[in-house]
Amino acid sequence: MKNYKSFMWVLFVGGLLCVERSLAAETPPQIPQEMPVLKLSLHDAIEAALDKSPQVRLYKERIEAARSASRTQLGALLPNVAGSSKFTNQTFFLGTIGGAPVRTQPFDIADARGTLSQSIFSWSLIERWRASRAALAVSEMEADTTKNDTMATVALHYMEVLRNAETANARTANVELYKELVAFIKSRQSGGMATGLDTARLETQLENERQRLELAKSDVERTKLILINALGVNFDVNLVLTDELTAPETPIPTQGDAMEVAMANRPEMKAQQQRIQVSRLSLSSVKGERLPSVQAQGDYGLIGNQVNNSTSTYNVGVTMSIPIFDGGQREGRIGESRSHLLQEEIKLDVVTRQITMELREALVTLTSAKEQLRIAKDGLKAAMTEVQLARERFRLLSSNSLELSNALFSLVRARDNMIDGLFRANASRVNLARATGQVEALR
């Protein structure tokens, strides 16, 4: 009985496996869909940032809001026309007759009327509208500031990806070189011309380079995601950068020339100057409330006890409003507006100093980065010579591999210094372009 139950259990499990295999055979395999390829040069990435970046799109909407506010202020200076119509059934109180109140019989009133109002003169409204126009210019300059910063950020992220890609390529070359030397040392060891310590030393360095290679590959993918996020495009793309990390050839401008360009192009400077203009016009608008204002009003319509039994009526007039005393509220607003104007003028000095500091820092960094790059080139050349000489010495003199191992370590470090120098030089070039307001011209 026990054997029979075991036999039935085996049949049951076997049947389930057969059913599972048949279902798996009937299910068509899922073919993975390839992600679309997005090829970008540095200039393409900068242009894409202007169209897709959420920050840029947000400031575009702020410009539209400022433009709408300006239209609202303009509407107060333009004619305002409205129409109305009403139909009522009403009575009037006639008085008391014989101690009893008396009213009229119900009657109908139909009234259709158009009204017109027009500001003839109001200095406060005029200055308020001009201030709204200046505020629109401020929004546009703030949007340009965001564009400049976004383009610089995208360019730096682009350089980060190129640096990590170059690092991955260097790590790959290091791994291949270590593999070749390990094989060479092992062949020398089999001939009794090298020791196990020589082989172990190079194998240890080989494994270290393999680990650093995997880290470099992950850094490439990570910085690609950061760049895609800054661009505002779909994450499901295969991003391919078409530019390479090369030494910048543009000469370093003088401090005076760079400062002149920065003051003319930096949107932060233009925006702050427009903020001062907004505060100045706002102060003038509040002061304008002291002056008389003149407004024309009128209406024309048909009125009668029936729609088909009416007569035309009109009302035309001019109103002059002369402010006399408002409890000191106007003077309080004038003092507040004057303080805002002084604050904006102080901020202009802050912005000027900030631009000056950023520009000088960019020039110092770029000068230092180019010098570091020159030193890194010489160091790489010397390291390659050291490796070549160490290999020849090891091959001819049958010495231990310590000199060769040290030479390889120097070569790895020299390659890293070269990549780091290229990145610093290009990043400094981007920072200088941002400091002078010329990021869009980067190639």
Image: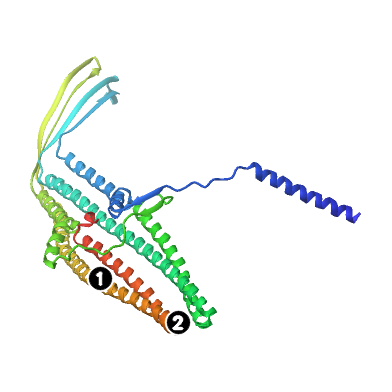
Assess disc 1: are there few (<14), some (14-19) or many (≥20) residues with their C-alpha within 10 Å of its C-alpha.
many
Q: Amino acid at mark 2?
A: Ser
Q: How many marks?
A: 2
Q: Amino acid at mark 1?
A: Ala
- Residue at 18% of width from left, 43% of height from top? 73
Task: Using the rendered image of the protein, determine whether residue 233 is visible from the camera's viewpoint.
Answer: no
Of 370 and 303, the residue lying toward us: 370
Question: Residue 263's x, y, as percent?
Answer: 14, 60
- Residue at 29% of width from left, 67% of height from top? 422
Question: Residue 241's x, y, as percent?
Answer: 35, 55
Q: Quadrant of the C terminus?
A: bottom left
**In the image, is residue 101 above or below residue 25?**
above
What residue does disc 1 label? 369
Question: Residue 275's x, y, as percent?
Answer: 17, 55
**In the image, is residue 121 above or below residue 1?**
above
What residue does disc 2 label? 401
Query: Which structural element holds mark 1?
Result: helix
Nearer the N terminus, badge 2 or badge 1? 1
Q: Pick out the residue farthest to the right.
A: 1
